[in-house]
Image (cartoon, rainbow, N blue to C red):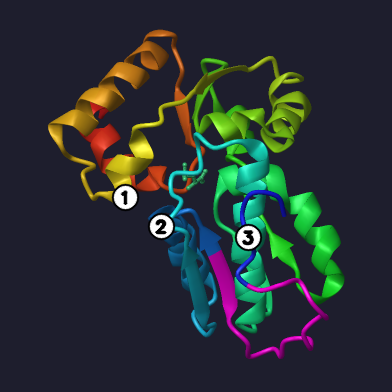
Amino acid sequence: MSAIQPIYPLVDPMPKATADAPIGIFDSGVGGLSVALEIARYLPNERFVYYADTAYVPYGPRKDQEIRDLTARAIEWLYREGCKVAVVACNTASAFSLDYLREHYGENFPIIGLVPALKPAVLNTQSKTVAVLATPATFRGQLIKDVMTRFAEPAKVKVIPVTCLDLVPFVEAGQQMSPECLATLTQILQPVVDQGADYLVLGCTHYPFLKSSIQYIFG
Ligand code: DGL
C-alpha cells in the first residue's frame, strides 16, 4: 500500500470461511447496490455485507494507484469480516485491482469483478455504433480495452467513450431528476445520439440509477 493505510495490517491468512458466510460486496458508494440487488435476486438465501467507501467517493477522478489502494483496503475489510467471496461491484475499482487481489488472496477468497457490458451491445447493435458511459479511470484500465479489442474491433463496431465526473455525485446525493442532472445528461448524451449510437452501455454501477432520467430525456 502506498498512500492509503490499510484498516488492518496484512497479517497471517484468516481461516477459510464456511459456506454459510456472507458475500462481501464493495463499491465506492451506493452504485454497487445496483449489483447487490441483482445478486440477491439470483441468490435469495445468501447473506451480504456491503462496503460503501463514502469517505473517498468518487473514485473516477482518482489516480490508478490510489484506486487500487482504496480497493485493497475495502476488500481486506470484507475478508476480515469473514466473507466467503468478494464482489468488486465497481467498474473503476475492478479496472486496477482484480489481478492484484486474486494474486494476494489466492483460491481461499475468490474475487469477482466487473467490466462494462460492451459485449452484448456489440452483439445487438444495428447501427454498428455504441456508446459506453464510464469513468475516465475505467477507460484507462486494461479490462475495457480487452473487450474492445476482442469483440468490438472484429465486429467493426464503433465504440464512443463518454465520461462525466458530475454524474456519480448526483447519484450519491439522490439528485438524478434534478434540472442540473438532466441538463448534464442531455449535454453529454445528445452528441452520442447524433452520431447514430443505438446502444448506451451504463459502464459504472452508479449509472443504472440514472436509467429513468435518461429515458425521461431520450425515450
Ligand atoms: N461505481 C463506480 C463504477 O462502477 C464508480 C463511481 C466512482 O467514480 O466512484 O465505476
Q: Is residue 158 above or below residue 184?
A: above
Disc sitting over residue 5 in the figure = 3
Tell me whether circle 1 and circle 2 mark residues in contact (CB < 8 Å).
yes
Look at 32% across and 42% down and name the residue there: 169
- Whichever of callouts 2 and 3 sits on the residue coming sooner in the sequence is 3
Look at 31% across and 46% down and name the residue there: 171
Q: Position of residue 33 (x, y in %)?
A: 42, 61
How many C-alpha atoms fall within 10 Å of the one at disc 3: few (<14), some, or many (≥20)?
few
Look at 41% across and 27% down and name the residue there: 164
Question: Is any part of residue 83 visible from this angle?
Answer: no
Q: Main secondary structure of the magenta part?
A: loop
Q: Is residue 185 above or below residue 4?
A: above
Label 2 residue SS: loop
How many C-alpha atoms fall within 10 Å of the one at disc 1: few (<14), some, or many (≥20)?
some
The boundaries of the magenta stretch are: 8-25
| Quadrant in which the N terminus appears | bottom right
Mark toward the viewer: 3 or 1: 3
In the picture, measured across the screen, residue 83 lies left or right of residue 136, that is right
> What amino acid is found at the position of numbered circle 2 in the picture?
Thr
Q: Which residue is mark 1?
A: 172
Mark toward the viewer: 2 or 3: 3
Q: Which residue is mark 2?
A: 54
> What amino acid is found at the position of numbered circle 1 in the picture?
Glu
Label 3 residue SS: loop
Task: Count numbered badges in the picture.
Answer: 3
- Whichever of callouts 3 and 1 sits on the residue coming sooner in the sequence is 3
> What amino acid is found at the position of numbered circle 3 in the picture?
Gln
Q: Residue furthest left?
A: 179
Out of 174 and 154, give the one closest to the viewer. Answer: 174
